[in-house]
Image (cartoon, rainbow, N blue to C red):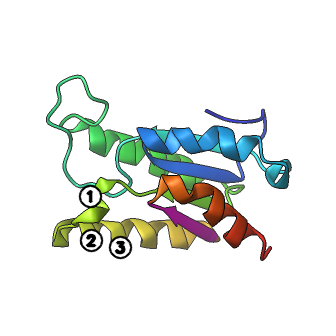
Amino acid sequence: MKSKNQQPTVIILGDSRANQLYPGFINNKNFENETFLSIGTCDFSSITGSDVIGSPCYGEKILKQRRFIDGIIEKSNSIKWAIVNLSDDMNKPSPQYIESLIQRIGFLEKIICKLLFLHLIHALDLILRLVFQRF
């Protein structure tokens, strides 16, 4: 989903719950000058696909999704923010998940200026007020 017919300045990444963040951001007057691109399909840093046949993250699909998203980010020179919704895997992360997360963060840091990670969607309003009051 894209909020305007312009190059995106903010990308929202994560699983399908990341898409739930999109309406809040595009309807917030503090972000009226931003163009949001929301791609919520698979976990941001998961290294294994879903076991559910038909899932957009089933098997090798997760790697195809990652390459597709990475291509968008690499080709864009307009994205300045990445908002990443972390999955429930963060409740008890495996060493492999942590390593993958570090790699994904490194990839984004090379290309995008600012990163915001969200894990507690229920605290989104509070987090937004605290973080963006400073800018």
Q: Amino acid at mark 2?
A: Ile
Does the magenta-highlighted stretch encompass residue 108? no
Measured along the vertical axis of the image, is residue 85 above or below residue 90? above
Q: Which residue is mark 2?
A: 98
Q: Quadrant of residue 63?
A: top left
The magenta segment: 114-119
Q: Nearer the viewer, residue 130 or 90?
A: 130
Q: Quadrant of residue 7?
A: top right
Measured along the vertical axis of the image, is residue 116 above or below residue 23? below
- Disc with the residue nearer the chain's start (1 vs 3): 1
Give the residue furthest to the left: 51
SS class of the residue under badge 2? helix
Label 3 and label 2: CA atoms lie apart by: 6 Å
Measured along the vertical axis of the image, is residue 24 above or below residue 96? above
Disc number for residue 102: 3
Q: Overall secondary structure of the magenta stretch?
A: strand
